[in-house]
């Protein structure tokens, strides 16, 4: 009997030291279980209506790709947040160069490679100096920014890093963008803060591509 108890105790001890099956599950396997891709046949009428809407220009989105397949878990929310995005990306006073730079600043804060990958190309296409994007990706203050880019960089950096905006940074932003412009730029970055959180939760990791600089750790 004593030998039996000894054998059982040793077996229990061994099992306790082994990692659980859940702990051993690779990250890639976990990510596949998060907001899995849906087929057209699986969509509810509300999801189908929203998917058709975002597939149209200027967005031209595939509902199966992140972040859209995440949004559609709540089609009511999806309709509202993409409406916000539509206005802030394409219907404000700002040129694409500055709009996309604001999005890159949000991506940089969250280290969101997915957002960065898509919007780096759009920023350069819109007129952003590629070196500005490369410096931002490298984690340092970009050199050679245009005046409005520098004002926006200072505003966003103080918000994200300091959780505060100095009087000087606010005055510069007010002179350059006006009150409405400040609100719209903050709203745009706020929208991409939401996107970043959803992509992080979904474990969405984009492939590396040679024409897009990969985000590096931020300089101290």
Image: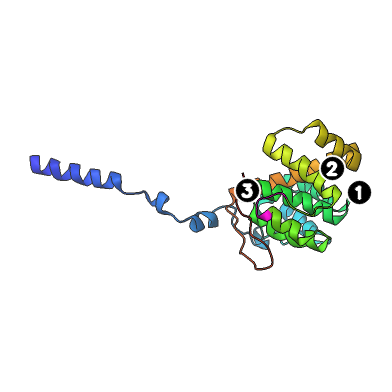
Cα gap from disc 2 to disc 1, whole angstroms:
9 Å
Cα gap from disc 3 to disc 1, whole angstroms:
30 Å
For the residue pair 21 and 142, the one nearer the viewer reads as: 142
Q: Dot 2, crowdedness within 10 Å: few (<14), some or many (≥20)?
A: some
Res. 61 visible in picture: no
Residue that appears at 78% across and 57% down: 54
Q: Which residue is mark 1?
A: 93
The quadrant where residue 185 appears = top right
CB contact under 8 Å: marks 3 and 1: no
Res. 192 visible in picture: yes
Apparent side of residue 61 relative to residue 90 in the rendered image (left or right): left
The quadrant where residue 206 appears = bottom right
Apparent side of residue 52 relative to residue 138 in the rendered image (left or right): right
Cα gap from disc 3 to disc 2, whole angstroms:
26 Å
Q: Which residue is mark 3?
A: 218
* Element assignment for label 3: loop
Q: Name which of mark 2 and mark 1 comes first in the sequence.
A: 1
Magenta span dominant secondary structure? loop
Residue 55 locus on image (x, y percent):
78, 61
CB contact under 8 Å: marks 2 and 1: yes
Q: Which mark is drawn over residue 178?
A: none
Residue that appears at 25% across and 47% down: 14
Q: Which residue is mark 2?
A: 184
In the rendered structure, which segment of residues is drawn in magenta?
137-141
Q: Name which of mark 3 and mark 1 comes first in the sequence.
A: 1
Asked if 184 appears above or below 52 in the picture, the reply is: above
* Element assignment for label 1: loop
Residue 119 locus on image (x, y percent):
74, 58
Q: Reply yes or no: does residue 101 show up in magenta.
A: no
Asked if 214 appears above or below 198 in the picture, the reply is: below
Residue 76 locus on image (x, y percent):
74, 45
């Amino acid at each position: 009997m004593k030998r039996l108890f000894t054998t059982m105790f040793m077996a229990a001890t061994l099992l306790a030291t082994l990692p659980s099956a859940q702990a051993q599950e690779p990250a890639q396997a976990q990510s596949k279980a998060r907001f899995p891709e849906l087929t057209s046949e699986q969509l509810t009428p509300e999801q189908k209506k929203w998917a058709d809407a975002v597939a149209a220009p200027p967005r031209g989105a595939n509902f199966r790709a992140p972040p859209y397949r995440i949004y559609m878990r709540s089609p009511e929310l999806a309709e509202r947040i993409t409406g916000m995005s539509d206005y802030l990306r394409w219907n404000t006073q700002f040129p694409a160069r500055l709009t996309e730079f604001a999005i890159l600043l949000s991506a940089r804060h969250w280290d969101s490679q997915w957002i960065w990958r898509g919007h780096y190309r759009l920023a350069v296409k819109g007129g952003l100096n590629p070196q500005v994007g490369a410096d931002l990706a490298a984690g340092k203050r970009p050199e050679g920014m245009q005046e409005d880019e520098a004002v926006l960089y200072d505003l966003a950096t103080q918000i994200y890093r300091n959780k505060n905006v100095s009087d000087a940074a606010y005055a510069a932003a007010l002179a350059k963008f006006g009150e409405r412009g400040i609100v719209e730029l903050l709203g745009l970055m706020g929208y991409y803060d939401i996107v970043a959180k959803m992509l992080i939760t979904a474990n969405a990791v984009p492939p590396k591509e040679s024409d897009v600089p990969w985000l590096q750790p931020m300089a101290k």
